[in-house]
Amino acid sequence: MKENCEKNFERISEYLDGELGRGACLQIEQHLMECPECRDCFEALKKTIALCREGAREEIPGDMRERLRSKLRDCFNCH
Ligand SMILES: [Zn+2]
């Protein structure tokens, strides 16, 4: 895992939850544009979250977040 990717990865679940400020979001978006590996992970993750939200129609529960984190980790580790 590249150093930048690791930083990005740490914040991406917060990013998807809309918990980050504008500056942090821009940093992540910038990284996603430059890094195809992260973009792939991100797209896969977004789909998972969308499905999850459609089903639940509420906040992502804590265990779901944990699952998303481990999914992300798997995804990054395979690159
Ligand atoms: Zn990356």
Image (tube, rainbow, N blue to C red):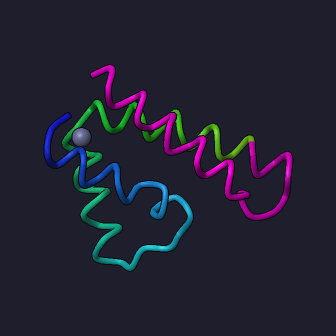
Compared to 54, does 48 lie above or below? above
| Closer to the camera in the image, 34 or 9 | 9
In the picture as drawn, the residue positioned furthest to the left comes out as 3
Residue reaching furthest top?
78
Q: Nearer the viewer, residue 10 or 42?
A: 10
Q: Report the residue at 60% width, 52% height from top.
A: 65
Left or right: where 41 falls relative to 7: right
Residue 78, placed above or below residue 69: above
Q: Quadrant of the C terminus?
A: top left
Q: Residue 59 placed where, x, y %?
A: 74, 64
Q: Is residue 58 magenta?
A: yes
> Is 13 situated left or right of 29 in this image?
right
**In terms of image quarters, where does ligand 1 lie?**
top left
The residue positioned 47% from the left and 64% from the top of the image is 14
In the visual, does 48 lie left or right of 53? left
Q: Quadrant of the N terminus?
A: top left
Q: Is residue 70 magenta?
A: yes
Q: Residue at x 53, y 40 (%)?
A: 45
Count of marks overlaid on the render = 0
Dividing the picture into quarters, in which one does residue 27 lie? bottom left
Q: Measured from the top left, where is residue 32 in percent x and y?
A: 29, 46
Q: Where does the image place residue 38, in percent across and percent down from the top left?
A: 32, 38
Residue 20 position within the rendered picture, expressed as x and y whole percent measured from the top left: 42, 74
Magenta-drawn stretch, dominant element (helix, strand or loop): helix
Point out the stretch of residues depicted in magenta.
52-79
Q: Could you tell me which residue is drawn at 81 percent across and 48 percent down?
A: 54
**For residue 45, above or below residue 59:** above
The vertical placement of 23 against 37, above or below, is below
